[in-house]
Image: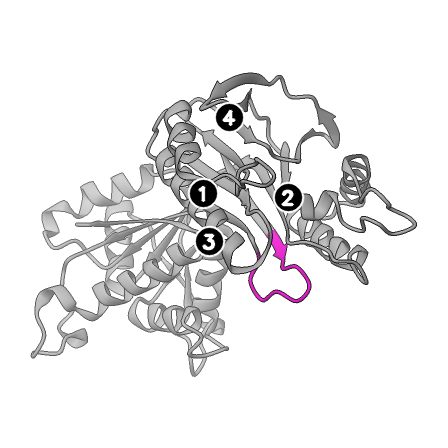
Amino acid sequence: MLTCQIEHAKKSKPGEEICGDSICVKKSSSRVVACVSDGLGSGVKASILSTLTTKMAATMLFHDVPFDEVFTSILKTLPTCRVRGISYANLCCVVYDATINECTVVEYEFPVVLYLRNGELVNLKKEERNIEGRSISLSKITPQENDLLFVMTDGVSQAGMGTPYFPLGFGLKNILKEIQSLLKHRLPPGDIVRHLVKLAEHLDKDTRGDDALAMVAQFRPLHVLNIFVGPPEDKSKDEAMVKRFLSLPGKKVICGGTTAQIFERVLNKKVQIELDTISFDSPPLGKLEGFELVTEGIVTLTQVFRYLENQQNEVGLAAQRLLNLMFEADEINFVVGRAINPAHQNPLFSHDVSLKFRLVHDVARILRERGKIVNIEYC
């Protein structure tokens, strides 16, 4: 199954602390929504209007509200400039449904939308709709692996406007050439949008300039990581939970010594302890066929949490391996056993706030804040 990886970069207009262009991304394993908006003008007012627009659109589209209803609500909400007769914000929404591998792009007064396959521009077939007296265009695409969709505000396309080299701005053709050149040099998509925003900032030097935001959606296989933490509460369910865990798609990690023993017993295989990986701050790693990592539980998870919370910059080998797997994953599934290890409990606290549960909950919270899809299942 494919997913849609979203990366973006933005800059503020010279002299402004807040960027008037906004992006809102919502995602699950089967649905990704990214909405980009350019607020009229710059600064706080533009930021409020564009943020309102993207939040409304992304929330409704993520919950499968029809496009016509979404844009009707937004166009009724957005004020119109009395002087210029235009909306105070434009909008481009990208909705990817992984279950049917369909990407829908909806544009309202948006300047730059480029879809590339194998480095070549694909001309999107646009269906024009009239909603609340405004023209909305809708395109449907069946993505292939490594397709790229670039969405940019006019702060990129109009960068350098009024200068000798680009009197009318950098322009769509130059943006496309720049992207294609960078792709030929194998620059990652995320680095490309960051480069384009820096380029816009350079071109705007000694001009009035504008806010700028560039986003790229890359269609690639979904990376899933499954982590089994702690033994099940009911020992009779050990075998069923092991088999169910093994059936999950994606990479697999065992986190906990007792948990590893359960897998050894059910699978009739032995975990090979790598004694040379033991150190003062890290328990040794284990090897088991079919698993990316086998490690101790509480110490490793504590180090992972402290690193993610910026409480420490260095962690042991086990925690670093687990962090690397987490950073590579789009979706992380924790299977957490409810069995309690008395050594990890404070007798003044209840079962629900055991150290293991707290650590998993806190790590999951931080990973979600970083854009990961995180699911927790208790057994």
Per the model, the C-alpha gap separating discs 4 and 3 is 26 Å
Can you give x and y, in whole percent of width and height, for residue 79 in the image?
A: 46, 41
Observer-side mark, 4 or 3, equals 3
Which residue type does callout 3 highlight? Ile
Q: CA distance from mark 3 to mark 2?
A: 16 Å
Query: Which residue sits at x=26%, y=39%?
Result: 244
Kind of residue at disc 1: Thr
| Mark 4 residue type | Thr
**Which dot marks residue 53?**
1
Residue at 66% in and 59% down: 13
Q: Earlier in the sequence, mark 1 or mark 3?
A: 3
Between residue 210 and residue 344, name the one nearer to us.
210
Residue at the far right in the pictured view = 164
Contact check, label 4 and label 2, Cβ < 8 Å: no
Q: Please tell me which of labels 3 and 2 falls first in the chain.
A: 3
Mark 1 and mark 2: Cα distance apart in space: 14 Å
Q: Which residue is mark 2?
A: 153
State how far apart marks 4 and 2 are (Cα).
Answer: 19 Å
The residue that appears at 55% across and 38% down in the rendered structure is 90
Label 3: element kind: helix
In magenta, the rendered stretch is 9-19
Q: Quadrant of residue 126?
A: top right
Residue under label 4:
104
Q: Is residue 272 left or right of residue 217?
A: left
Q: What residue would you read off at disc 3? A: 48
- Numbered disc in front, either 4 or 2: 2
Q: Amino acid at mark 2?
A: Thr
Q: Secondary structure at mark 4?
A: strand
Residue 82 in the figure: left or right of residue 168: left
Mark 4 and mark 1: Cα distance apart in space: 18 Å
